[in-house]
Amino acid sequence: MKETKEFQELVLGERKSLHDISNQLVVAQGMASFVLKAIKKKGDEGAEFTKEIERLEKVLASVGKITSIVQERREFLHSMSEDKK
């Protein structure tokens, strides 16, 4: 495929978007981890939050999966722009 300036701009734009999404995922993961640890640290007092703990663990698992998808896409786009150099 012949590389065009428009193609490179498209790739760079998507990489920037993925970077921005990744930053927000890091914040979400960090905050959810913080809350989860705080609840678990309460021990018996936190026992009433069993459902919330399960939900936060599911949130963290989902954020981890999304992060992996974003990383794979970023690597693919990076390789596309490097292949053209």
Image: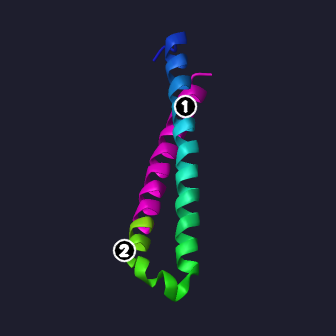
Residue at the bottom extreme, as displayed: 44
Structural crowding at the residue carrying mark 2, measured as other residues with C-alpha within 10 Å and reported as few (<14), some (14–19) or many (≥20): few
Quarter holding the C terminus is: top right
Mark 2 against mark 1, which lies toward the viewer? 2
Give the Cα separation between the discs numbered 2 and 1: 37 Å
Residue bounds of the magenta highlight: 57-85
Residue at the right extreme, as displayed: 85
Residue positioned 54% across, 40% down in the render = 75
Residue 29 location in percent, x, y?
A: 54, 56
Dot 2 or dot 1, earlier in sequence? 1
Q: Secondary structure at mark 2?
A: helix
- Asked whether the viewer can see residue 4, the reply is no
Amino acid beneath label 2: Lys
Q: Is residue 20 above or below residue 81?
A: below
- Asked whether the viewer can see residue 68, the reply is yes
Residue 82 location in percent, x, y?
A: 60, 28
Q: Which residue is mark 2?
A: 51
Q: Which residue is mark 1?
A: 15
Residue 57 location in percent, x, y?
A: 44, 68
Amino acid beneath label 1: Arg
Residue 9 location in percent, x, y?
A: 54, 17
Examine the image and state in which quarter residue 78 appears.
top right
Examine the image and state in which quarter residue 19 appears.
top right
Q: Secondary structure at mark 1?
A: helix
Residue positioned 50% across, 37% down in the render = 76
Q: Which mark is residue 30?
A: none
Residue positioned 54% across, 86% down in the render = 43
Residue 72 sits inside the magenta stretch: yes
